[in-house]
Image: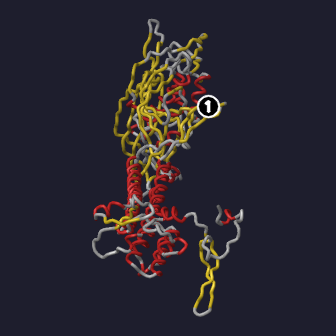
């Protein structure tokens, strides 16, 4: 500690110890330049530690910012299989990297603050102070509690201790919290292969027990079509034979269907309640009753289907069929006729009747579909397909129109399997319906008689529950258009036929679809990583002042008790060459001395003797006797050779 004695207020030339080459046992002093004095004992290790801390925290921030919004890294990869068991290799994830970064920062800040506190303590000895102040500085550097409670006695050593503690406790959790994962989706264009029959097989849908020549409808379903209809009505998911889709895929696939060509007309419509048809001029002469027994003109809602022979051969045999759909629905407002006393004498409703007349032709069409191969919990399932409900069923693009055979190969007399007539029968059962308002009868609780064929008609009546209950009290009814639903249902059933009719000989078609997969993406929270960065840099700023004055120390310093005892001039460590030595060099000189902590008598005053525990050199003739070496001494810290 040569330059402790050379402490000056202003700039001074430091003292560097050197050994005379002609006499290694002697030590001389020579002046060194100010520039060399500043550079010679720079705490390079501490500077490097703090630099690595800065680079580490900046690297962690860069990592967090760069992977923000990116897909979550896999935690392991498949590397092989042994005896049927999958082998996977774990991968390093960002969370692991951030954890390692925190460990590095905490370690290096701890090392740096230790060096800074050591230099600050020795710097205080150069400035001078009381033994109490030196003890206080030592406590500030070794106890966070003491540093926090320093109060007005706080100094750069306490500040450095607090700064290191802040970095150790707060930096890591904040940086870890800055990076989280959120569920998102990833879109990509993929090639998908599918097997779907491109037309309805001959004789697939129904059995005809009447005259085939004139194209009479089906009497009942075939077994194959019965399964299709059961799955449709039970809403069993459609499971196509596909490959190449992992997730949710959207796009267009080709399958058999129907192309509608519709004409729409809207005419004024007036409904008048009646007892006999002669009281209703708009219905006079209408003697043909519908199945309800009421005049057919009183239908306010109806859906009718029929098979339409399209092409005949030379013998007038039907070659293939189309389908006819006629939909009518009304929207009426009530205008009653009353007596002077307010009694209703006639119920009148005026409004409009809209009619959709559609010819449906079989064709190979492009369906907008959604295929899902992933369940809500993320596991893989068999592909399930549905027609995109958001698409207008009238917008399905036909690839080619099809001349389907009227009947199949199973023809016996006047019975045969039919190709499309079973579909007409199915639609009649699903949607064939009417809603009729009957005669008005005064002084009855229900002045209107209501007749409904197939309750599906009521689903298109725009009415509240209360209005449904009191439907017989008014003719003001408003219906919505069922045509899109009917076309959509017809094409879904036909698509199910295409899926059900697929076999080994069905060609494989290739499609390009948009695949959407649920993925976890990283989300960086700027508030957290910015706080972590700020705390780390603040901690470094709180530690750096503790290195101030390193150039005045003139040598390496530590808080090694041997070095500190030598500085306090402990007799046991005295040596003629122990000048300006750090702990390592000091141990080279006196490290082999055998010492022991023993009571030593000291004279106090005249004739008074006191005993004091001291560490003494047992080889010194004046030292008290020391017991022989115990073999167990090495386990309890005793001296030994």
Q: How far across and down, in percent of the image, does residue 488 sit?
A: 46, 33
The residue that disc 1 covers is 81
Query: In the displayed structure, would residue 609 be above or below residue 234?
Result: below
Q: Is residue 128 left or right of 293 when viewed as pictured?
A: left
Picture mark count: 1
Its colouring scheme is: secondary structure
Q: Is residue 565 above or below residue 107?
A: below
Quadrant of the snapshot with the C terminus: bottom right
Residue 151 image point, x, y percent: 43, 80
Give the crowd class for mark 1: few <14, some 14-19, many >=20 residues within 10 Å: few
**Callout 1: SS:** strand
- Percent x, y of residue 596: 63, 71
- Please name the residue shown 52% across and 75% down the image: 570
**Side of 14 relative to 213 (left or right):** left
Q: Is residue 171 above or below residue 459?
A: below
- The one nearer the camera, 165 or 438, is 165
């Amino acid at each position: 500690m040569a330059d402790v004695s050379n402490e000056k207020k202003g700039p001074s030339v430091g003292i560097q110890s050197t050994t005379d080459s002609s006499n290694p046992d002697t030590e001389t002093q020579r002046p060194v330049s100010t520039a060399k004095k500043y550079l010679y004992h720079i705490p390079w290790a501490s500077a490097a530690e703090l630099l690595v801390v800065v680079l580490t925290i900046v690297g962690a921030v860069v990592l967090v910012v760069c992977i923000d919004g990116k897909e979550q890294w896999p935690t392991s990869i498949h590397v092989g299989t042994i005896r049927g068991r999958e082998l996977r290799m774990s991968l390093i994830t960002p969370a692991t990297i951030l954890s390692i970064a925190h460990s590095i920062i905490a370690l290096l800040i701890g090392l740096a603050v230790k060096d800074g506190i050591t230099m600050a303590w020795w710097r205080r000895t150069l400035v001078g102070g009381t033994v109490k102040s030196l003890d206080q500085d030592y406590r500030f550097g070794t106890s966070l509690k003491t540093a926090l409670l320093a109060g007005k006695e706080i100094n750069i050593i306490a500040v450095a201790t607090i700064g290191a503690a802040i970095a150790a406790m707060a930096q890591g959790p904040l940086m870890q919290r800055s990076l989280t994962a959120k569920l998102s989706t990833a879109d990509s264009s993929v090639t998908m292969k599918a097997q779907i029959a491109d037309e309805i097989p001959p004789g697939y849908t129904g059995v005809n027990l009447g005259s085939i020549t004139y194209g009479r409808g089906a009497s009942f379903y075939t077994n194959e079509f019965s399964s299709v209809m059961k799955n449709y009505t039970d809403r069993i998911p459609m499971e196509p034979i596909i490959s190449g889709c992992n997730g949710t895929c959207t796009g267009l696939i080709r399958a058999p269907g129907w192309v509608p060509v519709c004409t729409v007309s809207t005419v004024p419509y007036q409904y008048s309640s009646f007892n006999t048809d002669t009281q209703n001029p708009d219905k006079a002469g209408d003697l043909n009753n519908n199945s309800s027994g009421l005049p057919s003109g009183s239908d306010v809602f109806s859906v009718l289907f029929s098979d339409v022979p399209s092409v005949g051969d030379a013998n007038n045999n039907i070659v293939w069929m189309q389908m006819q759909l006629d939909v009518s629905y009304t929207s009426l407002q009530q205008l009653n006729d009353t007596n002077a006393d307010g009694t209703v004498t006639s119920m009148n409703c005026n409004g409009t009747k809209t009619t959709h007349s559609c010819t449906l032709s079989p064709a190979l069409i492009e369906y907008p579909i959604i295929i899902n191969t992933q369940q809500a919990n993320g596991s893989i399932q068999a592909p399930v397909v549905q027609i995109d409900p958001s698409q207008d069923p009238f917008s399905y693009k036909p690839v080619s129109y099809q001349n389907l055979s009227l009947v199949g190969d199973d023809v016996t007399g006047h019975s045969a399997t039919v190709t499309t007539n079973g579909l007409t029968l199915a639609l009649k059962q699903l949607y064939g319906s009417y809603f009729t308002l009957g005669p008005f009868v005064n002084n009855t609780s229900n002045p209107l008689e209501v007749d409904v064929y197939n309750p599906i008609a009521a689903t298109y009546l725009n009415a509240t529950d209360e209005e449904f209950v009191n439907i017989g009290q008014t003719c003001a009814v408003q219906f919505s258009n069922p045509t899109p639903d009917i076309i959509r249902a017809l094409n879904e059933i036909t698509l199910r036929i295409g899926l059900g009719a697929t076999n080994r000989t069905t060609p494989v078609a290739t499609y390009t679809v948009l695949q959407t997969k649920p993925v976890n993406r990283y989300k960086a929270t700027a508030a957290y990583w910015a706080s972590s960065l700020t705390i780390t840099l603040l901690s470094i700023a709180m530690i750096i002042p503790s290195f101030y004055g390193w150039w005045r120390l003139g040598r390496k310093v530590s808080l090694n008790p041997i070095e500190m005892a030598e500085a306090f001039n402990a007799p046991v460590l005295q040596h003629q060459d122990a000048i300006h030595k750090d702990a390592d060099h000091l141990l080279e000189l006196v490290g082999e001395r055998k010492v022991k902590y023993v009571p030593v008598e000291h004279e106090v005053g005249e004739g008074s003797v006191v005993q004091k525990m001291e560490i003494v050199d047992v080889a010194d003739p004046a030292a008290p006797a020391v017991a022989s070496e115990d073999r167990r001494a090495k386990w309890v810290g005793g001296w030994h050779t």
